[in-house]
Amino acid sequence: MALSREAYRELEGIVGKENISDDPALLDCYRYPLSHTAIHIGPYYRVYTPRGAAVLLPGSAEEVQGIVKLCNKYRVKFKPSSTFWSAWGFPLEDDTIQLDMRRMDRILEIDDKNNFAVVEPHVIGATLQAEAMKVGLNTHIHGPGASCSCLASATALGGLGPDTLYMGHHNENLLGVEWVMPDGEVLRVGSVGSGLGWFCCDGPGPSLKGLVRGMIGTNGAMGVFTKCAIKLYPWPGPAPLPVEGKPPAYKAVLPDNFRVYTLGFPAWKAWADSCYLIFDAGIGYVAHRQFSMFGRDLKGAMVRILSDPTKTLSDIEELLKDPEVQKMTEDMKRDYQIVLAGMTPGDIEWQDKALDKILEETGGWKVKAMLEPDLYNWSLLYMIRLGHKNLNLVYGGGYDGCFGLGGTPDFGASGEPPRVEQATAFKVEWEKKGNVVACGGDAMMGGIGGMGGGGHALWENFTHFDPADKASTEGTFEFFNATDKYGMEKGFGPGMEKMNDYARWTDGKTTPKEIRDRILGAAAQPEAFRYQRKFKETFNPNDLGDGYYRTLDDPIE
Amino acid sequence: MALEDYKVDMERCSQCSYCKWIPFDQVKSWRFAKGCPSIAYNNFLSYSARGRYAVALSLLNGQSTYSDRVVDIVYKCTTCGSCDVSDKICRYNLEPLEMIHELKFRLVEDGQVLPQLTAVIEHLGKENNMMMKSGANRGDWAEGLDVKRIPGESAEVLFYAGCRFSYDEELQETARSAVTLLKNAGVDIGIMGVDESCCGGRAYDMGYKEEFTRLAENTIKAWTAAGVKTVVTPCADCFRAFSRLYPPLGAKFEILHTVQYFDRLIKEGKIKFSKTIPMRVTYHDPCHLGRQGEPYVPWEGKEKKVKNQIVVYEPRRPRYNGAWGVYDPPRDVLKSIPGLELVEMERIREYAWCCGAGGGVKEAYPDFSSWTATERIEEAKSTGAEAIVSACPWCERNFIDAINAAGEKLKVFDVTDLVKQAI
Ligand code: SF4
Ligand code: SF4
């Protein structure tokens, strides 16, 4: 049902004429191409998410509330999104109202005594980090990088990233939420709801955090989060970051209490052992298998290109012939990057020694080439600001992660041959078909562990392709189908490449119920989705969200 | 290239939104993190480079047709190129600014034009200037100036004033000072006065490519006939037109901006300062001197793929991302002036915030243009500077207008003005 003129006028009355549009071309800017990193579906060549009925730019929680109430009155679905990274934030059905939260972009408070910030939806990692650093604090920046909404990551998704080792997942950092519920009522969750300030998202009384977030975030399918508080962490460095150099190869020379190393290991077991030893030692500020996303064979050449403003992708073939680059690439075969940040001179000295000891015990090394000043300062800035995350797409414009070897650090490292190598060999065979970038199979990127070593390591095997090329896009899809099958057969668990199949289907719209039920029913803990159905019935009686909220209709056992 | 040639770019744009911000590595605060004035002012996604890719694709695919909104989206862009710099942090094979130009060209070809721009372009066609003034008065700014007149006389260096300096009475003194300073430093300099015509750069940024080509070809012909080898201009818009847009049309002149020439003369000891200027100033990088002021590199080639799907170009395609723009000469000049203290704003060099005067925006959307300038004024004020200094009359005019409208006290100077004061 298209939006009636009457409904449009009423919505316009809430946000003002300049903040609403139903122009078709403008609406097409709010359609996500499922031909590239749609995370994690497809890719489907030249398929787009459905066109909305109108786009609205609310400027306050009151306006959001007014919009949501009108949506209930007219029974129109709505979908909020803040920074629109990937297909998650876009409608699943035609004629949905798209809320673009861009105008709500204020950092409302940074409490440097209690280490938290209160932010609106469109505050991004880069701006919050820059402001937090001014008072000696830092924010977790989740995997998609500095361009993305902090609130969305904390409220609507899992929010893991390279600094998760020190700063946790963003869901753990959530200290309170203001939630415009799907029926238009406003609920302040956590201590703030009792007028006690933003310091805890649970209680007093029964915690609603789990309800608000759902199992792994509501993906914008259950009302609208209009502000939230996020825990901040110590930053023992300068503000602003002392960035120098020419674009795109910016670098930062940080004081002597910082280190960045690319660590290499002789075997996957040693790799995993080092992670556990790092957890035990309690060292590290950022730790991530980062540059491996360019591929086992190409990463040495790529870091050379990316850290040198005179180089472009056209240099890759020449660089690959360079013996020094070949040596560096080999040294980085089983690697991760780690940033150490000393809170005192003694602390950094101790962390350095502890790391050296860990390397001694595991037979690992600091990759020498990455210690050259240019690469060192480039990688330090890269890991701290996470402002180059869309290098994911640098090769041909499309990427998605597959397999997803998630678990303890030795999950990928164990097996015979190690699961990483099994996944690598499998991908190498598919690379031979020509549709995805031939990068050496292993382009597995991900963290080494959660806060203090808790949580799990997660590697997604990046697959790079050209979304403007039919054969490449469709060939990637075939590869993902094969990956999914292979991963299940091998006991890797469900692959990331199909993670959102339960919600969005091949035409870009809601997945047919029967397929959705089958996928969600086969999940490890389907009961959670039955409970979520009950939540939905209670809090979203007119069903104005979308299928990203995971529900199962059969009765709770 | 035609708009259709950018279709692959449209399909490869990953909607990452980097183009809305300054490069994230350079973000120093919440307040001054935005890069694209168009989306900062208009808010809908369509007003970013990402959005313009999507609008263009929608039009090419026949999913939508021209509307007032489409026209608004396309023209409400200053063509400042901030998006291009930020995009190229992660994307090595997209050219958003080129596509934005092609989209404007297409709308003009299809008659989807704005009356405010049509009036300017019609006047340009008759009088060869962007200022809605008579072509016969173009040389008036130099009246009484003791300088050679080309083509009647010959000179080693042509001083090209540009439309704004030729006609804007409040700014003309800057052009006169520049000529005098260069001449006194021993440069054999001449001007074309009434025989000078618009460089065409601003018409190009408005979408009027044919008009640009006509003007560029006339200028190239006139300079060639006059034996011109070196051109110096005090206008960043003209500088970019001559150094980046003219060479593909066959131009082979040495192009310098006055700040580059001053820098050279100061370093050679040919300009010496005798006075102190005790003032704290900040410098605004004009888009056309900074990120769009990189030297032209000829290239003809095609896309190819290596390692199956890595998109590269054969031969190697030059990358324009602001890395090699003109940033240090104006700063070096300012730093060499006794007593002057140069303080930097947060957004500088390749990631400077636009003044808001480009792309036809000042002519067609004065409120947006003024807001963009006001944002820069706020940033300049945050440094504690008494004055904002630049090297482009269009930026300076927009700042003066915005300052006057807001009743602000910040002073506006051209680098030339301060050099002159210090002598
Ligand atoms: S930065 Fe480039 S790739 Fe990213 S959205 Fe903008 S134009 Fe597209
Ligand atoms: S050229 Fe400037 S105004 Fe236009 S889209 Fe790019 S950044 Fe925005």
Image (cartoon, rainbow, N blue to C red):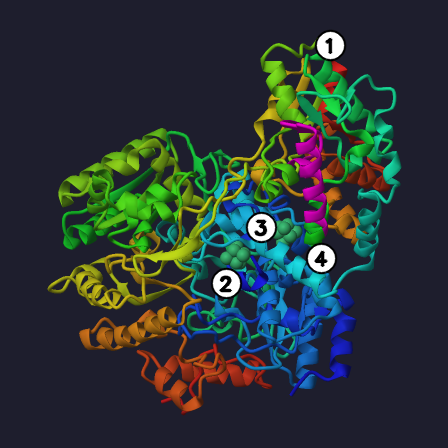
The amino acid type found where label 2 is placed reads Trp
Residues beneath discs 1 and 3 located on the same chain: yes
Between residues A537 and A42, which one lies in front from this camera angle? Answer: A42
Q: Give the magenta part as a residue range.
A: B211-239
Q: Are marks 2 and 4 in contact (CB under 8 Å)?
A: no
**Residue under the image location 49 percent in, 37 percent down:** A241
Instruction: State how far apart marks 2 and 1 are (Cα).
Output: 55 Å
Residue B314 horizontal/vertical position (percent):
39, 50
Mark 4 — residue? B75
Residue for badge 2: A85
Q: Position of residue B186 (x, y in %)?
A: 68, 12
Label 4 CA crowd tier, 10 Å (few <14, some 14–19, many 20+): many
The residue carrying mark 3 is B83
Q: Nearer the viewer, mark 2 or mark 4?
A: 4
Q: Which chain is home to disc 1?
A: B
| Residue type, label 3 | Cys
Q: Nearer the viewer, residue A448 or A307?
A: A307
Q: Nearer the viewer, mark 3 or mark 4?
A: 4
Q: CA distance from mark 2 to mark 4?
A: 26 Å
Task: Tell me the SS state at disc 2.
Answer: loop
Question: Toward the viewer: B375 or A59?
Answer: B375
Give the spatial CA distance, label 3 vs label 4. Answer: 15 Å
Discs 3, 2: same chain: no
The residue that label 1 is drawn on is B275
- Asked which secondary structure carries label 1, the reply is loop
For the stretch drawn in magenta, what is the main secondary structure?
helix
Reply yes or no: does residue B223 show up in magenta.
yes
